[in-house]
Image (cartoon, rainbow, N blue to C red):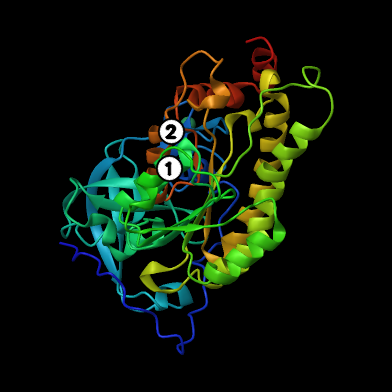
Amino acid sequence: MTPPLQKPKRKNPILRTRLPVPPPQARSRYALGLLRGAAQGRLELQECRDCGQVQYPPREMCRRCLSDRLDWKPQPEDGELISETLLRHSLELFFRERVPWRTGLVRLRGGVTVVAHIHADVPPPPARVRVRAHLDRAGQAVLVAIPERDTPNMADDKIMREMTCDPKFRKVLVTDGKTAVGQALVKALAKAGADIVWVGNAEPWKNFPGFDEIKSIPQVTLLNLDVTDQRSVREIAGEIAGRVDIVVNNAEVHRTYGISARYGTDAARAEMDVNYFGLLRLAQEFGPALKARGADGVNSAVAWVNLLSIYALANFPPHGTFSASKAAAHSLAQCLRAEMRPTGVRVINVYPGPIDDEWNQLLLPPKIAPGALANAIVNALRQGTEDVYPGDVAQDWLARWRDNPKALEVEASNP
Ligand SMILES: [Zn+2]
């Protein structure tokens, strides 16, 4: 059984922080297909459209009938560990720093055999296991065999700690605590065992509803952070950037206008200033410190969460300028992800549908509740998923966008 993770002692400031070394990254173009499922926490393998063969490792053609009509399909996760190898030595620096390390072969229920990292709580083979697709610290898809049933402290295993961004004992910044989503996030992160939750508030002279409750949570420290002000972001970064393990950028401005419903650019500018430039300012001031701490022990810097919107994928004309600002943020977040990837810090992009808040009062349900959205974000950190589409509307838009982006554009403009 995995021993429970101990709260880390204060870091010795004289010791040098270990530099992040990414795990091996070489993959064929076909193997990258595993990524899409893994980014959302799903195990997907190639299935042949002509003969039904499921295959692993991924290849250009079906190994049974040589067809090239291969689709990535979700697979049953249960199977049997049939053999294992304990890595005691490795020529790869990443594994050399982490041996001993278990790997093995698992025969999935679907009949195909895969190579997987093995959780410490899995008994020796033969043993029933579940296989999960995870992203490793290099952002590449890997398979992990976990026990058939959950065990105590399972998430504290060193292999899981490498694959996930569990907030337990970590120090988190939530950039805006005055919104319903921000407050739900602070509560969910504190409940998940975060060590410190810094909470940004751009207007400290106002007393927002619910703020007293947030202030009474022991882990919470309020900060006067205004993401539209470079100096404010720099000052707060100077104070805490060297200690933050997870940034949750939930600051957003949401106005409900298209192009013709309002004259002038003030509202659209305010949206861009927070939703797009706010992310850019935060990334410039906090990014370097996070990147430097990507391998800082079991409580290293691990994640950067962006609250985007499903309207980043296709414009929703009644909220047209908001959609445009989120599309800009979505594009910038992809850049941030690429720059963070070599250091092991994961960028998690969250694309909710309409949130049940004041800006969506006029929209008919379904809308996602702030608490449900906060839980989805904490779950994504715990699972280590990279792309999150919480709520029914987001799932529906995603399915339609994958199927036919042009059709989604037409449907979104005729709600
Ligand atoms: Zn085939």
* Of residues 38 and 4, the one drawn nearer to the viewer in this rendering: 4
The three-letter amino acid code for the residue at tag 1 is Gln
Label 1 and label 2: CA atoms lie apart by 9 Å
Determine crowd level at label 2: few under 14, some 14-19, many 20+ residues with C-alpha closer than 10 A. Answer: some
N-term-proximal mark, 1 vs 2: 1
- Number of the label disc, if any, that sits on residue 370: 2
Label 2's element?
Answer: helix
Report if residue 49 is visible in the image.
no
In the image, residue 249 above or below residue 371: below
Report if residue 215 is visible in the image.
yes
In the image, residue 46 above or below residue 360: below
For residue 166, side relative to residue 13 (left or right): left
For residue 110, side relative to residue 46 (left or right): left
For residue 62, side relative to residue 237 (left or right): left
In the image, residue 254 above or below residue 189: above
Q: Quadrant of residue 403?
A: top right
Residue at the image position 59 percent from the left and 71 percent from the top: 238
Residue 88 spot, x, y in % from top left: 31, 77
Residue 325 spot, x, y in % from top left: 71, 36
Determine crowd level at label 1: few under 14, some 14-19, many 20+ residues with C-alpha closer than 10 A. Answer: many
Q: Nearer the viewer, mark 1 or mark 2?
A: 1
The three-letter amino acid code for the residue at tag 2 is Pro
- Number of the label disc, if any, that sits on residue 183: 1
* Of residues 152 and 135, the one drawn nearer to the viewer in this rendering: 152
Q: Residue furthest top?
A: 414
Instruction: Check whether the beta carbons of the residues at disc 1 and disc 2 lie within 8 A of each other.
Output: yes
Residue 172 spot, x, y in % from top left: 44, 58
Q: Quadrant of the C terminus?
A: top right
